[in-house]
């Protein structure tokens, strides 16, 4: 190592966001990031690859971040330290951000930056001048998480139940009650309770096993020809149904029964039917097709059931906007606000993938701070890539610089 850098970081306003370990002398990771300390003034000596400028913290802005991301550990860095930053298609990335700015959540996060992004003639300069990158770490300090992929599936279906098309795509049941716990307990503002009223009590809604076989009095959007494809439609969250009359029906996530998501791939590993390293969408589907008599057994391992609504455009996520292939990700909004602009680094389809992305969706299987699901698009190629994607992930959030913002995250 050629340089010894003394970095002084003031963090009076960041104490509420996370806990940072005591500074230690250690070998640098491939991605160098400078931690925001929990002391009033802290002097830290580290070995680094090359000098970093002193990171001036946007104190008021960081305080607002703490309010929205209380469980998230952030580590300040610079754009020059983001892997392959210089190879990004900045104009395309900025276009994805501008598209996300159509939503109220993104506008609330980035206020006047949304307007200025539309007027920018130099996408890279705009991003580097207006934002500061912060690496997202797990609460235990781990920098590496997990990236998976999802896609928009296409099923075959009918508006009427037949011998072939017999598996219903359900709308949200009329008796499903959703309670926003934050309305009673502010500290639980990101949690919801779901169930139904029986007598004078709110009880859990039926699990997948309790409602199988898939039939009942609930309102149906359409019927499809494959129980397995319908299950994976629930996992993906949205899709297309090609009807018998040639029309295409777009459907998307509306609600779920309140039971936690449990991965059926994990169940197949547990019963020694698949090896952990072999689990993918393709291997699971192949196993189910080979063992049709055990489909209910395996699918019922996941108590969660998703309910849908009809849409009038292709895949859109929880942010309520049409998803962009390889630019839209699903995140855990307990750690990352919907609408956030992020940078990610992972291996996708045997290639290094380092791109700006926007948090536009959520998912039952997406849990944790350094965790994302990358939208791959529609079609067979998207399915093949998404189904096999399982990669180590590094994730950064881009926060607006304080001097340019009146309001923010």
Image (tube, helix red, strand yellow):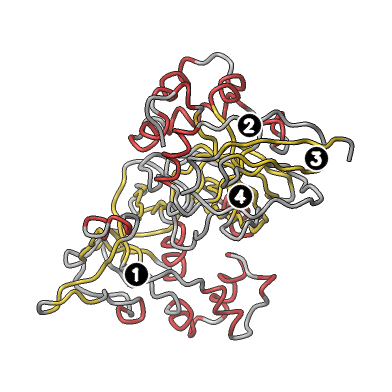
Element on which disc 1 rests: strand
Q: Nearer the viewer, residue 359 or 275?
A: 359
Mark before the other along the chain sequence, 2 or 1: 2
Residue 48 circle label: 3
Residue 260 vertical placement versus 333 (above, below): below
Q: Which residue is mark 1?
A: 167
Percent from the top left, x then y, of residue 210? 31, 81
At x 66% / y 45%, what residue is drawn? 345
Q: Nearer the viewer, residue 303 or 115?
A: 115
Q: Which residue is mark 4?
A: 381
Q: Nearer the viewer, mark 2 or mark 4?
A: 2
Mark before the other along the chain sequence, 1 or 3: 3
Which quadrant of the rendered structure holds the C terminus?
A: top left
Q: How far, Cα to Cα, is label 2 from label 1? A: 57 Å
At x 17% / y 67%, what residue is drawn? 175
At x 42% / y 24%, what residue is drawn? 405
Q: Nearer the viewer, residue 161 or 107?
A: 107
Mark 1 in CB contact with mark 4 (< 8 angstroms): no
At x 56% / y 41%, what residue is drawn? 40
Mark before the other along the chain sequence, 2 or 4: 2
Q: Quadrant of residue 93?
A: top right
Q: How far, Cα to Cα, is label 2 from label 4? A: 42 Å
Q: Which residue is mark 2?
A: 55
Q: Nearer the viewer, mark 1 or mark 3?
A: 3
Element on which disc 2 rests: loop
Percent from the top left, x then y, of residue 317? 40, 47
Q: How far, Cα to Cα, is label 1 from label 4? A: 26 Å
Residue 248 vertical placement versus 276 (above, below): above
């Amino acid at each position: 190592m050629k340089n010894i850098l003394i970095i002084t970081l003031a963090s009076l306003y960041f104490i509420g966001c996370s806990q940072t370990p005591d500074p230690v002398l250690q070998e640098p990771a491939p991605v160098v990031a400078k931690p925001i300390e929990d002391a009033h003034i802290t002097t830290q000596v580290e070995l680094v690859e090359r000098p970093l400028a002193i990171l001036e913290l946007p104190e008021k802005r960081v305080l607002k971040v703490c309010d929205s991301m209380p469980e998230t550990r952030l580590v300040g860095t610079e754009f020059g330290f983001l892997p392959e930053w210089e190879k990004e298609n900045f104009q395309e990335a900025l276009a994805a951000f501008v598209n996300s700015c159509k939503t109220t959540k993104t506008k609330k996060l980035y206020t006047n930056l949304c307007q200025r992004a539309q007027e920018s003639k130099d996408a890279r300069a705009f991003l580097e001048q207006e934002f500061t990158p912060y690496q997202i770490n797990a609460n235990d300090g781990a920098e590496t998480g997990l990236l998976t992929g999802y896609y928009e599936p296409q099923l075959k279906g009918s508006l009427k139940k037949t011998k072939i098309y017999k598996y219903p795509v359900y709308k949200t049941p009329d008796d499903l009650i959703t309670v926003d716990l934050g309305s009673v307990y502010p500290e639980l503002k990101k949690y919801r309770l779901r169930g139904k009223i029986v007598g004078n009590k709110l009880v859990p809604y039926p699990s997948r096993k309790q409602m199988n076989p898939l039939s009942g009095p609930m309102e149906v959007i359409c019927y499809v020809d494959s129980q397995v494809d319908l299950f994976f439609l629930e996992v993906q969250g949205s899709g297309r149904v090609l009807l018998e009359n040639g029309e295409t029906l777009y459907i998307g996530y509306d609600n779920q029964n309140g039971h936690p998501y449990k991965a059926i791939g994990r169940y197949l590993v547990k019963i020694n039917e698949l090896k952990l390293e072999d689990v993918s969408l393709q291997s699971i589907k192949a196993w189910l097709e080979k063992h049709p008599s055990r489909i209910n057994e395996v699918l019922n391992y996941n108590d969660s059931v998703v309910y849908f609504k009809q849409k009038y455009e292709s895949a859109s996520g929880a942010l309520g906007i049409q998803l962009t292939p390889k630019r839209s990700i699903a995140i855990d909004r307990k750690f990352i606000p919907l609408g956030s602009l992020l940078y990610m680094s992972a291996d996708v389809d045997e290639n290094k993938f380092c791109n700006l992305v926007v948090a536009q969706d959520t998912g039952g299987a997406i849990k944790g701070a350094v965790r994302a699901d990358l939208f791959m698009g529609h079609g067979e190629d998207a399915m093949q890539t998404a189904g096999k994607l399982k990669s180590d992930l590094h994730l950064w959030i881009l926060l607006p610089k304080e001097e340019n913002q009146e309001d923010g995250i």
